[in-house]
Image: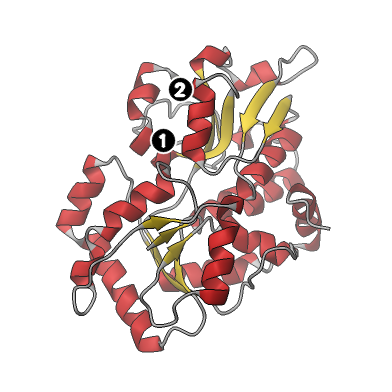
Amino acid sequence: MRIGLAAGGGYDLYTRVIARHIGNHIPGNPTVIAENLPGGGGAVLAADSYNRGAKDGTEISIFPGGLFLQRVLGQSDLSFDVSGWEFVGAPGISEYVCETQDRSGIKDWNQLIGPNARQGAMGAIPGLGEAATAIVKDTTHANLKIVSGYAGTAPIRLAMEQGEVDGQCANDWSSLLASSLEDLTSGKQLIVLQLISQKKQGVPQGDAPTVYELLTNDEDRAVMKVGVEDPGIYARPYVVPPGVPPERLAALRQAFDETMRDPAFLADAQTANLDVGPKTGQELAGLITDMQTMSSTVKARLKQYYNVP
């Protein structure tokens, strides 16, 4: 199982827990190894998997699903296509937030808006991380400085602790609960904006406002939904490259679905504070198909945010 982002983040944590259990549900009970291949916000692994990945079902890859959106928008330097992938499943959806470090002094999104707003430096992962932060900046008119190039949420978290940046947008609740529950509970890390339609319930700081409370026109809302919220639903796709035989794909999908119901896996996930709300491979494939039907107006704006010519 290959991970397109750095160790320590949500993608890494989910995969390592899944890797401990999924082999028990694959015919032959193979040993499963998790390894990281970070770079380009997951684009390095996506290209490697699509063009050189094993076609016998022995390699499963995970990288941010927002890369599929970037490819549909026409980002030509992504060395893979949207067609041909086979989706195994996803352990849950990503519900993105903007967070800050308490040392930054930013405790309320309103501190970043208006003529007397202070500037907030936000770390970002290339791809969805950069674009989501830019969309939030533009649609809420916040005074943000985007600091990009980080390999994952864990390096950004370290940069926040060291004072290099004030926070980040496009981290997700499940990653935060897994990696930073103590900091959220103590107030060391602060959720200042939720990039979802409905506020989270039963989690620390779930009372932070949603971005939709700040948006004033329908086009901005559509851009936020298609460009940030919806990609969260297909954010954590486990995939195999084109050419994997149907029977092997079916076995992997069945193994993944069984793992998501496995009491031992669920206990492991709970211990690691991982939120499990799986999507099947068929569901993911349908979401990617639907994403390609966005309006031309929304597509034109998203191309700007993703720096697609």
Query: Tag 1: residue type?
Result: Leu
Residue at the spot of label 1: 176
Q: Quick check: 130 above or below 93?
A: above
Q: Is residue 100 visible?
A: no
> In the drawing, does residue 185 fall left or right of residue 299?
left
Q: Are marks 2 and 1 in contact (CB under 8 Å)?
A: yes
Residue 204 image offset from top left, x and y in percent:
37, 27
The quarter holding residue 279 reads bottom left
Question: Which of the numbered marks, if any, corresponds to residue 48?
Answer: none
**Frontmost residue, 237 versus 209:** 237
Identify which residue is drawn at 19% across, 79% down.
Answer: 28
Q: Secondary structure at mark 2?
A: strand
Q: Is 135 on the left or on the right of 65, as rendered?
A: right
Quadrant of residue 76 within the rendered picture: bottom right
Q: Residue at x 57, y 75 (%)?
A: 51
Q: Nearer the viewer, residue 45 or 111?
A: 45
| Residue 112 at x, y percent in the picture | 69, 20
Residue 189 marker: 2
Comparing 182 with 58, the one in front is 58
Mark 1 is surrounded, within 10 Å at the Cα level, by few (under 14), some (14 to 19) or many (20 or more) other residues, namely many
Name the residue at the left extreme.
Answer: 264
Which quadrant, please, contains the N terminus?
bottom left
Colour scheme employed for the rendering of this structure: secondary structure
Count residues near mark 2 (Cα–Cα under 10 Å), then give few for <14, some for 14-19, many for 20+.
many
Q: Position of residue 99 (x, y in %)?
A: 53, 28
Helix, strand or loop for disc 1: helix
Q: Answer yes or no: is residue 225 visible.
A: yes
Separation (CA) of disc 2 from disc 1 = 10 Å
Q: Residue at x 68, y 68 (%)?
A: 293
Identify residue type, mark 2: Gln
Q: Position of residue 16 (x, y in %)?
A: 31, 53
- Residue 31: image quadrant is bottom left
